[in-house]
Every structure is written in structure tokens, then in C-alpha cells.
Amino acid sequence: MAGFDSLKVRTLIAFIYVPILLLFFFFGKIYMHIFFTAIGLICLYEVLKNLKLFKFIIFFSFYFVILQFIENQTLFLELLILFVLLAPLIIYYFMDLSPRVLARIGIFLMLYILISIGCYYTYLFRNSYGFKPALFVLLSIWIYDNFAYFIGVKFGKNHIFSVISPKKSLEGVIGGLLCNFVLGGVVGIIFFHNILNFAIFSVLIGILAQIGDLYESLFKRYLGIKDFSNILPGHGGILDRFDSILFSFPIIYFFTRL
């Protein structure tokens, strides 16, 4: 019964945040830009709180906002690299540099890069390619995430990422990717008369979504936490919910620019 109640809460929250996210993707432009900047700031809050680095929230948030509103991609990446080089020195000035602190700094830098690049290039992808391609990527991420979860819960027996994410199963991964293959094929044949390319593309997006989820889970495992927060009951925190999106969109953006 507890599991059923948890599923109901998870479904209810999804019915709230999914339309909101789709709305901002639809309108794009400054609306989506501001929305993902806000999402990034909440993610930073969650990360800094769990890493016990919360006293740096003002500095890192201010720098994050500046990065998000830089239009030149080269300048954005240069300033992000500069931040990575200087951030440990800033933290070291205030803290005793024990091995535990070093580990927290390393985790923070990797997550800061993920959040900054993820928010920036998710907006840039939508702005560059329009609503429909962005929606296709978003749906591919959601289809994989949800079907892998439900199939894994129902049929999962062979756990393949037990060290990082104990609940992930081979059955869930395969089921999620098969659903992506079907989604890509359906979209391809209806809108583009090309089944195979879109089916494969959707599967690749599903793989990226899984890697993004594992990337974040690795750090949660080290910190000994299940979720970064409980802002979204049944889903965890904002970063827990957006990790696959923030990881996938930048890679897909660079891939499509080749």
C-alpha cells in the first residue's frame, strides 16, 4: 500500500510539473531562459546545502546567473573554465583543506559544470532548433526515464548498476530503450517519413538520459543521500528530476552541430 501511495504522489507531481515545463519549452525565448536560470539556482541550492558549502551560495549563484545570460558561447565556456580554476582557491581561503573537503570541492565543481552547461545549452538548443526538435528530445528522455522505472519495478531482477544505483535493472534499461525505439519510429514515420534514423536517435537520447541519471547518482551515493531534496515528493529534488535533461541536451546540441 505504501508503494501504491508513493506512485500516486509521483504521478500527481508529474501532472503538475510536466505541463509547466512544456509551457516554457513552447514559448521559448526569454521565458524559457529565465525559467532554466531559476531551475539552475534551485539545483545549486540543493548541491551547496548537501555539500555543506552553503555559505558560498551568493557568490556561486551570482556567477551562475552571469554565465546564463552570456550570448557568446566561446565567452561562456572561457568564463566557466576560469571559474573552475579559481573556485577551489576561493573555497580554500575559508576552509581547512582536509581530504573530505577536497572531495566535496571536486563534487561541487563537477555538478556546477553540469548545471551551468545543462541550463545554458538546453535553452540554446530550443532557441536554435525550435520547439518540435526540443520536444522530441524531451519526450525521448521522459519516455525512457518513466518506462525504465516502471518496467524495472515490475520485472526488474538483474541489477546492473548496484554500486551506484541499486534499483536500476537490465530489464528496466532494455524496456526503456525499446519504448524509445518505438517513439522515435512513430515520430519519424508521421512527421519525417524516416523511421530508422529517428528510432535510433531516440534510443541514443535514452542512453544519454541513463548516463545523466547515473552521473548524479554517483555523487549521491558518495554523500549517503537518496535525493538532493524533497521539493518534488516522489521525485526528489529539482536536480534529481532534471539531471537527465541537463546532461543530455548539451551533448545532443554539440552532436547536431558537427
Image (spheres, grey):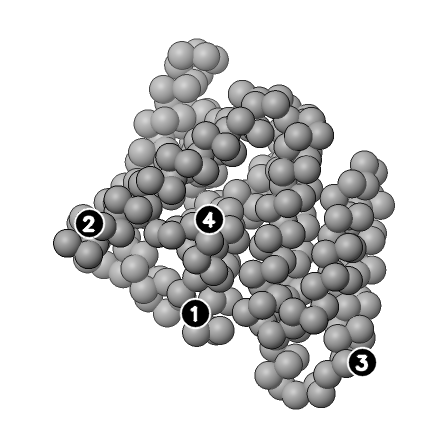
Disc 3 and disc 1 in contact, CB within 8 angstroms: no
Q: What residue type is labelled 2?
A: Phe
Question: At which x and y percent is residue 216?
Answer: 50, 59
Q: Residue 246 bears which disc, if any?
A: none
- N-term mark: 2 or 1: 2
- N-term mark: 4 or 2: 2
Residue 146 vertical position relative to residue 181 in the rendered view, above or below: below
Q: Residue 93 bears which disc, if any?
A: 3
Q: In which quarter of the image is the N terminus?
A: bottom left
Question: At which x and y percent is residue 194?
Answer: 44, 16
What element does badge 3 sit on?
helix
Q: Distance between the residues labelled 3 and 2?
A: 49 Å
Name the one closer to the observer, 140 or 220.
Answer: 220
Q: What residue type is labelled 4?
A: Arg
Q: Which amino acid does label 1 sit on?
A: Ile
Mark 3 crowd level (few <14, some 14–19, many ≥20, 10 Å Cα): few
Q: Name the residue under label 2.
A: 4
Q: Mark 1 points at which residue?
A: 225
What element does badge 2 sit on?
helix
